[in-house]
Image: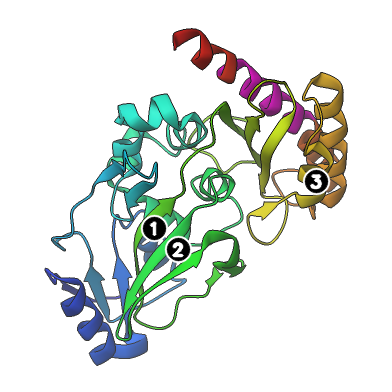
Amino acid sequence: MNSYEYLTPETLDSAVSLHQAHGDRAMYIAGGTDVMVKIKSGKIAPDYLISLRHINSGKEIVLNRETGELSISAFATHRMLEKSQLIRLHYPILYDAVRNIGSVQIRNVATIGGNIVNAVPSADGAIPLLALDAAVEIYGSKGKRRVDLVHFFEGPGQTVLEPGEIVTKIVAPALLPRTGGAYKKFGRREAMELPILGVGVLLSLKKDSGKCARVRICLGVAAPTPMRAVEAERFLQGKKVDEETLHRAGEIAARESRVRDSVRGVAWYRREMVGVFVRRMGLLCLERIKEKEMLQ
């Protein structure tokens, strides 16, 4: 394994300055669960690793009670999200995803920001955040900017980040009333394996009916980047949500997907499973909306 110098800045400005000083020879590292694997396999060979673990920016997971906006530090670990009562009770779509990422040991160090920045099609954390209409806050030498997650991914391993920029926060707008969410990582095992497919559904019902007020259907390992099945969403909008309409939405989402053959699964099977799990996650959303209403 190549040698490298490990740098430990304590502020965002220091981290950005170090990256500017060392350029392409430097790489940011947070939890390191992906970066160290790439180094050991010889895929990357940085001369400098700039650690983000010591930056004093907090690792908060906060719900603004006035606006309903959810704010998650990009440096928060998957385990922090998994153990958060706020996430488990109010954002089950995200809880479903983070509790099955790797092992407990991995979740203790791997960060949600790193999961997003890696930009792999199988990133479990990205799918529910895409369904939540989240945006990422980015900091660099030119200051701060915010990018909607739907526009963040450009291809496998590619994002809109410019050299030296750091994702610092994920922000999601307030949920509508009568909203339920669900995510399924589909694979041969629940954890410790990359998924064959990931499906997330966020469903909001109208106030006095079972009709769809808003829906997001998001897919992982179904295209070069995490994707929304927008035609399936349009189909459900305004319709009564039941098993029949969810089955139809699943068929549409399956056609929208851009699945391909791989060592983990063939395209036709992935496409079939898109339809199956869109329906199942939609039904689970309905169950969760009913459960929430019963507790109120």
Quadrant showing the N terminus = bottom left
- Towards the viewer: 159 or 259: 159
**Circles 2 and 1: CB distance less than 8 Å?**
yes
Closer to the chain start, of discs 2 and 3, is: 2
Q: Residues within 10 Å of mark 3 (few under 14, many from 20)?
A: some
Q: With 258 as the anchor, is 148 left or right in this view?
A: left
Disc on res. 234: 3
* Image location (x, y in percent) of residue 111: 34, 51
Residue that carries the numbered disc 2 in the rendered image = 117
Q: Is residue 279 magenta?
A: yes
Quadrant showing the C terminus = top left
Mark 1 residue element = helix
Assign the magenta stretch its main secondary structure.
helix
Q: Amino acid at mark 2?
A: Val
Judge depth for marks 3 and 1 and give the one in front: 3
Which residue is farthest top?
A: 294
* Image location (x, y in percent) of residue 108: 28, 40
Measure how far apart labels 2 and 1 are at the Cα level.
5 Å
In the image, is residue 248 above or below residue 265?
Answer: above
Mark 3 residue element = helix
Judge depth for marks 2 and 3 and give the one in front: 3
In the image, is residue 243 above or below residue 98?
Answer: above
**Circles 3 and 1: CB distance less than 8 Å?**
no
Closer to the chain start, of discs 3 and 1, is: 1
Instruction: Tell me which segment is drawn in magenta.
Output: 276-288
Residue that carries the numbered disc 1 in the rendered image = 114
Q: Amino acid at mark 1?
A: Gly
